[in-house]
Image (cartoon, rainbow, N blue to C red):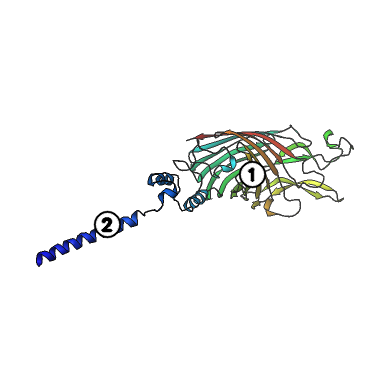
Amino acid sequence: MLPSLSRGLRIALVASLSLGYVAARGHSQPVYADDDEDGGDDGEDSGDGDKGDDGDGDGDEEEDEDAKDQPDVTSGGLFTLKTYPVREISRPLSMTEKVAQLRLSLGTDISAKGAFESFGASLEGIYGQTDNFSLIGGLTDAYNFKQFGLYFGIEGALAYDLINFRLAANLHRTAIPEFCGTATMAPANCTDPITGMLQGNLPDGKYSAGGTKFSVDLGFPFRYAIKPEIAIVALQTLMSIDFNSVTADHVVVQNDANGMPVPKEVGNRAKPDLNPSVGVATNPIPPLSVVIFAQLRIPDFDTSAGAFQVPVTGRVEFSPNQKLDVGLEFTLLNVKPPEGQSPIDNRFLSLFVQTRVGK
């Protein structure tokens, strides 16, 4: 009886192992019915799987949506110089790691009464220390060096490719325009060619140097792409924290004893200035970029009438490849001018070229 019992135990054990194996195989490799109707055997199904189709109709869409939320990448990580986008809106808000960008610009005053009588040159640079942290610096010049800015600082990402933090030390001064003034002092070009009347409140094309200030500039450069071809850009500058005061910084128009508006030089105290900016960028075709932005300048946060300026700049840029951009900038120095001036009277034009070098 013992041999029969032993043989029965062996048969039961083999049967249990066999059933367990079949059950395990059934969970790990489900069997599909009607393979012929689905259009292929297991080999064809594997081929479809290589294309990202898992057969349920949902996984591919989820993967595509996830991919849209991710920044553009290359096999080595984020952009390199070879993969740097030609389309400006597609470029990262921070400079790519170990890539340097240099920008040289030449400009001239083309104001109503001072066209081509003063010039300026600027050299600026950005270096990507990492993909989300850059060093910035440059020397800007206008009106035959009556106006200049020498700055150096940092820019880092707060939210990658959406908003940055910008902080820069800036030694600078502004050019003070001279005005046509009274009839006895007015240059020949200060009379209207049609009416012959004196245009007393109009800059005559000459400039003097204002006071030199040291400031720390603060900005939160922001870019949000509404569409691949259109983006909102803002807060390249927000405010300047001044460390000294000057007696000549800008011009306002005040009424004299006779109630007539007269331009007057005013200073800038050692108080913060408000300088927010906002604009729109568009890429109608990948190599061509058009940007229009405005800045509100309020010295000492003084919002009283006549104490602020609104310069508006339009930029057209052409990028033949990843390493080179050429373009033109046209600036209306104040679209909300004092009485006696038109928004288009004071203008500046500059031609620029910028190149990128690095890894």
Q: CA distance from mark 1 to mark 2?
A: 64 Å
Residue 295, image x and y in percent?
68, 47
Q: Amino acid at mark 2?
A: Tyr
Residue 336 vs residue 152: left or right?
right
Residue 270 visible to an observer of this rendering: no
Q: Nearer the viewer, residue 286 or 279?
A: 286
Total number of numbered discs in the rendering? 2
Q: Secondary structure at mark 2?
A: helix
Q: Which residue is mark 2?
A: 21
Q: Residue at x 42, y 48 (%)?
A: 36
**Crowding at label 1, few (<14), some or many (≥20) Cα neighbours within 10 Å?**
many
Residue 164, image x and y in percent?
55, 49
Q: Residue at x 47, y 52 (%)?
A: 59
Q: Nearer the viewer, residue 260 or 331?
A: 331
Q: Which residue is mark 1?
A: 281
Residue 49 visible to an observer of this rendering: yes
Image: 55 above or below 324? below
Q: Nearer the viewer, mark 1 or mark 2?
A: 2
Q: Secondary structure at mark 1?
A: strand
Q: Residue at x 66, y 37 (%)?
A: 316
Q: Amino acid at mark 1?
A: Ala
Picture quadrant where residue 209 is located: top right
Picture quadrant where residue 186 is located: top right
